[in-house]
Amino acid sequence: MVEAPAWQGPSEPASTAGMAGIAAVERDTGIAKDTLRVWERRYGFPSPLRDALGERLYPPEQVQRLRLLKRLIDAGHRPGRVVAASEQALAALLEQGRDRPEAAEAAQVPERDLEGFLDLLRQHQVMDLRRQLAQALLRMGLGAFVLELAAPLTERVGALWMRGELEVFEEHSYTEALQQVLRQAIQAIPQIALAERPRVLLTTLPGEPHGLGLLMVEALLALEGCACLSLGVQTPLDELPRAAAAHRSDILALSFSGMQAAPQVQRSLRALRAGLAQEVALWAGGRSAALQRRPVAPGLRHLIELHAVPAAVADWRLQQAASAPA
C-alpha cells in the first residue's frame, strides 16, 4: 500500500485571483517547469488547480513552499526527502541548516541595525532607504559597508522573500536601491588607485538573473586595485571566451545564487574552462551547492564568502610574480 504524501493540497477556492501560472512559478522559484511536473506526479506536490483551458494554477502558499524546497535542495537535501515532507520536518531541516559552518560564519558578522532598513523597505520608502544606505556607506567605507551591512542585509531580505514575508516588487526595490549606491561608490574610486592588473571580467551564466552579489564582488575587487569590467548578468556561455580574449582579461569571475541545478552549473563550468585560454583564471562566487560538489571543473577557484576576495587577489599577484622571468 502506497502511503499518502505528508503534503495535502488545498481545496479548490472560489477564485483564482492571486494564483500563478507555471511559467511565473518557474521564474519566481528557480525550479524548472519539467521538475514541477515530475514532482507533481511523483510526490503529489505541488498540487496545482486548473483554469478553464486546463493550464496549471499555483496558489500562493504552494509557491512559498516551493521557494523553501529550492533553498533546502540547494543546501544539499534530496528532493525525495523534502518535497513531500511535513511542515514540521521542513522546519527541523531549516533549523539544522543554521548549524552549518557557513551559517555560523555568517552569524559572526558584526550586528548592525538591519531592522531600520527593512522597515523602510516594508513601508515602501525607497528614496529614504537609498539615502540611509548611502549615508551608511559614507560612515563605514566601501569595504566594511559591503561585508558588514550590504551582505547580511541582502541575505536577510532573501530569507524574508523566501518565507513570503516580502513581495517580489519589494525585493526588487531593495535590489535596485543597493545597486545604485554600490555603482556610485565604485565609480567614485579614483582611476589612479586602480592597478593595471589583474583585469577581471565579471558576469553570470544564462539562467542566473541575480547580479547583486556580482556587484558586491566588483566593489571589493576595485578596492584591491583590480581593473574590473562587468558584462551584467546572463552572458551566453559561448561568448565568454571571446569576451575574455577581447578585453585581455586575467580573471573571469562568475556569481551564483543557487538558481540553477547542480548538473547544469557543473557542465557549464567545465565547458567554459575548456574554452578559456589557459592563462585566464576562472573564479566562481557564492554558496550554491552546485559549486561545493567535487569535481566541478579543473582550475576553478570557488570563493564561498566575500571575505575571501582580497586573499584571492593577493594569491593571484603572488603567482604572477613567482612566474615572471627573473
Image (spheres, grey):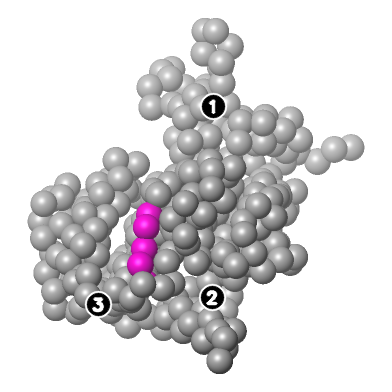
Residue carrying label 1 = 22
Q: What's the magenta bit mostly, secondary-structure-wise?
A: strand
**Tag in front: 3 or 1:** 3
Q: Count every numbered label the image shows and give the total.
A: 3
**Tag in front: 2 or 3:** 3
On residue 210, the disc is none
In which quarter of the view is residue 45 placed?
A: top right
> Crowding near pointer 3: few (<14 within 10 Å), some, many (20+)?
few
Q: CA distance from mark 1 to mark 2?
A: 33 Å
How far across and down, in percent of the image, does residue 52 sit?
Answer: 52, 7
Residue closer to the observer: 151 or 223: 223
Q: Earlier in the sequence, mark 3 or mark 1?
A: 1
Q: Within the magenta stretch, is there residue 229?
A: yes
Residue range highlighted in magenta:
226-230
Q: Earlier in the sequence, mark 1 or mark 2?
A: 1
> Crowding near pointer 1: few (<14 within 10 Å), some, many (20+)?
many
Residue closer to the observer: 191 or 175: 191
Task: Kindly identify the residue that appears in the image at 25 percent across and 49 percent down.
Answer: 176
Q: Within the magenta stretch, is there residue 163?
A: no
The secondary structure type at the circle numbered 2 is helix
How far across and down, in percent of the image, does residue 143 sit?
Answer: 29, 77
Task: Kindly identify the residue that appears in the image at 43 percent across and 64 percent down.
Answer: 200
- Type of amino acid at the residue the image marks with label 3: Ala
Residue carrying label 3 = 193
- Type of amino acid at the residue the image marks with label 1: Ile
Q: CA distance from mark 2 to mark 3?
A: 33 Å
| Left or right: 248, with 94 as reference point | left
- Type of amino acid at the residue the image marks with label 2: Glu
